[in-house]
Amino acid sequence: MLGLLRPSRGTIEILGMPPAKARTRIGYMPQHVQLDLQFPVTVLDVALMGRLGRRLPIGPYSRADRAGALEALRKLEMQDLAGRPFMALSGGQRQRVLIARALASEPQMLFLDEPTANVDMVVETELFELLHEMSKTITVVVVSHDLGFVSQYVQSVVCVNRRVMVHPTASVTGEVIRDLYLSDVCMVRHHHRDG
Amino acid sequence: MGEFLTDLPRYPFLQHALLVGALAGVACGIIGSYVVTKKISTIAGSISHTVLGGLGAARYCQVVHGWDWFHPLYGAVLAALIAALVIGLVGMKARQREDTVIGALWAVGMAAGILFISRTPGYSEDLMSYLFGSILMVSAGDLWLIAGLDLFVVVVAALFYNQFLAVCFDEEFARLRGVRVEGFYLLLLCMTALTVVLLVTVVGIIMVIAIITLPAAVAGEFTKRLWHMMLLSALLTVAFTTAGLALSYGPDLPAGATIIAVAGTVYLASVVGVRLFRLKR
């Protein structure tokens, strides 16, 4: 959908444009972030990269760019760490910074590919709460394999398994999930008993 | 050391050498930081060795065909740029072959240089001196060319700092933000090529790979932002070339090798020192 791969059939339009043109209006967070963790950048440096598509391709970042990047970091509660080296962060914090980077471009749509792939349960819940909050103002698209979990937070699910199906969330039941994955899903109750 | 200081005001060749070391140091600090963080030091090494081909070809044309304007340094610039573009384009089109091309250009550039030199009648010892550096033989004319290359590298690096940073840190994201990643990568390789030519005059073809990576690696131990790394790395390179010149002058040691020895010692000390300091805490 971002125009990185060419479709073998059909065409893709996003916001009424071909993907290569619409790209700069989309915030994107990739799944496998193969970043060099020795790279000398601060949290703010990374968030500022989100501003690249919005400015003259020459010279330093403007005051508005800095303000935009800091605002994006604030939304993810990372503004206090703006001066920290990116490599000194925990996995969950890094994930937040990358979402902030995507947000810093003030996108009309936000694409996230498996945003919770490398983080623990607590962080995962926090992230989805946050994305849910954001989805009130912009379109948020999340790619996830964890359907049951995600469905509490989203309005509609597009399932891709050779064919494409669109479901409103209310109808995502155990049955639909089973049809999709061709296997049964067991909900595991995970309540801890106290005392 | 004392001899160096007393002779410095008297001999222009010493002043030129000092100036070349400083000029090359600035470009080296900036580009070296990119080379280290983007991990393309073998590309820099390969470009450096193709420079001999350029030097040899230019001298051959000068002597045999009478192209007097074709200064060996022009040949060096041309060969380095061609090598950078070839490696860059092959890397983009066929990623798995990049390694092979780097190795091939490394050796073929060297071979072409040696063949041209062997076919050039007359005295060509000075070309061989480019292998190990010839900072004391820099003429006033060379100085202008070196200053021009230096200025170009610094200005381009400053203007497009944010783009280069984004391309080195996360290519895919930079592309999605509308940055012309391929163009900037090629530009970065071309600037690396120009810096390599600058450094060939200082430490010689064989030792370029050390002077381009060691100061940046030392700076990387102590800095957390790329431009801090560049600044510290540039200061270190200037300090290394100056110290190397001063130390080598009295006992008449080869200047290029002394510079590299200084850089290597400081690198080793900083790596070990930083680790020990962390252990103690």
Image (cartoon, grey):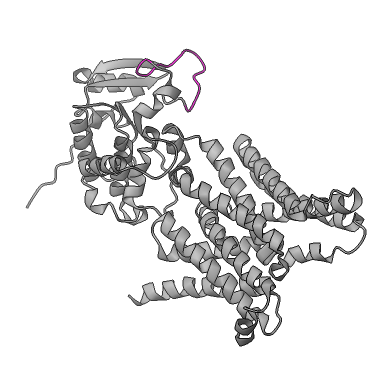
Q: Considering depth in this image, is A193 or B89 the residue closer to the camera?
A: B89
Residue at 18% in and 32% down: A133
Whether residue B133 is in magenta: the answer is no
In the picture, measured across the screen, residue A151 lies left or right of residue B60, that is left
Q: Quadrant of the C terminus of chain B?
A: bottom left
In the picture, measured across the screen, residue B105 lies left or right of residue A17, that is right
In the picture, measured across the screen, residue A172 lies left or right of residue B52, that is left
In the image, is residue B185 above or below residue A11?
below
Whether residue A8 is in magenta: the answer is yes
Name the outermost residue toward the bottom.
B2
Provide residue A53's location: percent of width, then percent of height.
Answer: 39, 33
Q: Main secondary structure of the magenta part?
A: loop
Residue at 50% in and 34% down: B180
Provide residue A45's location: percent of width, then percent of height.
Answer: 35, 48
Q: Which residues are magenta?
A: A4-16
Name the outermost residue toward the left.
A195
Q: Quadrant of the N terminus of chain B?
A: bottom right
The mark tally for this picture is 0
Provide residue A175's location: percent of width, then percent of height.
Answer: 25, 19
Q: Is residue A38 visible?
A: no
Name the outermost residue toward the front.
B10
Q: Is residue A149 visible?
A: yes
In the picture, measured across the screen, residue A96 lies left or right of residue B221, that is left
Residue at 64% in and 50% down: B193
Name the outermost residue toward the top.
A10
Provide residue B231's location: percent of width, then percent of height.
Answer: 45, 61
Q: Considering depth in this image, is B81 or B72 the residue closer to the camera?
A: B72
Residue at 22% in and 28% down: A135
